Amino acid sequence: MTFADGNILASRRVPVTTIIINRTEVRNALDVKTARGLAGAFQLADADEEIRAVVVTGAGGAFCTGADLQELAATGAFFPWAGNDDGLLAAPLSKPVIAAIEGSASAEGLGVALFCDIRIVDDSASFSAASRQWGCPIGDGATVRLPRLVGQGRALDMLITGRVVGADEALAMGLASRKVARGTTRAEAEKLAHQVAGLPQAALLADRCSAYESFTLDGAAAIAREVQRARATFGPEAQAGIRRASQRATGGIRLLRA
């Protein structure tokens, strides 16, 4: 499936959809049409009841280098990346999103990476708030999501200076989740997405949602909301899983005693 005249590709292999930014001639920078196409691909995957996890990556050895500067210079066009209901990065999807990052995730590309739940990188990956160099403000959610992910001090260092953070440093600070062999990020992300899709979903989705909601609530309210979600999802799926785990544990104890 294609969006934005082929600038966004989507490969649907139930229960996983992989979304590919495909503007290799500009290192996957997003013009307004492509940004809307990416938003449409996210929305379609999110609404698909057979899809349990989404992978997003870039073609040609780059993840995404942000907004298309030539278009911005010519038109001053602004796409609501975050903060609007129709924004590309307005709110988390209802299911896990895994980024497969090779090459640069810079400017709004950093925002796309931060929108994801898990970021898998290889040693070519880098992250930066590159728009600092040309005086553009950030409107993609990075000033909110980056401090929550890596801490205020590290986030301000990146946001103020615009410096480039490589794969190893990103892994050490928690910006990257996992590092894999060069050229394997998409394969490893899709493998992980299928593993996630194979887990019991009710508790997984409830806990993921609780983690995101915790940022909008005080501590006591966040814990109360977690408990509320836990009670709501402690149903047949959870009880069946507990029985299976209990049986395996009992079998293991018997083997040890034997």
Image (spheres, rainbow, N blue to C red):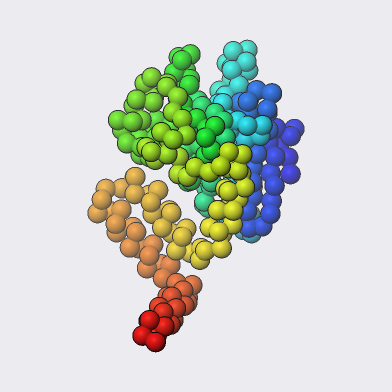
- Taking the view exactly as shown, the residue that stands out farthest to the front is 258
Q: Is residue 108 left or right of residue 187?
A: left
Residue at x 25% of width, y 50% of height: 219
Q: Nearer the viewer, residue 83 or 51?
A: 51
Q: Is residue 92 visible?
A: no
In the rendered image of this protein, does residue 127 appear above or below residue 190?
A: above
Q: Nearer the viewer, residue 237 or 170?
A: 170
Rendered location of residue 193, percent (x, y): 57, 53
Rendered location of residue 5, percent (x, y): 75, 32
In the rendered image of this protein, does residue 200 appear above or below residue 187?
A: below
Residue at x 37% of width, y 37% of height: 173
Q: Nearer the viewer, residue 104 or 172?
A: 172
Quadrant position of residue 42: top right
In which quadrant of the rendered image does the N terminus lie? top right
Residue at x 43% of width, y 67% of height: 233
Rendered location of residue 141, percent (x, y): 44, 33
In which quadrant of the rendered image does the C terminus lie? bottom left
Quadrant position of residue 165: top left
Rendered location of residue 162, percent (x, y): 42, 21
In the rendered image of this protein, does residue 75 appear above or below residue 108?
A: above
- Taking the view exactly as shown, the residue that stands out farthest to the left is 220
Q: Is residue 29 visible?
A: yes
Give the mark count.
0
Q: Nearer the viewer, residue 127 or 12?
A: 127
Residue at x 24% of width, y 54% of height: 220
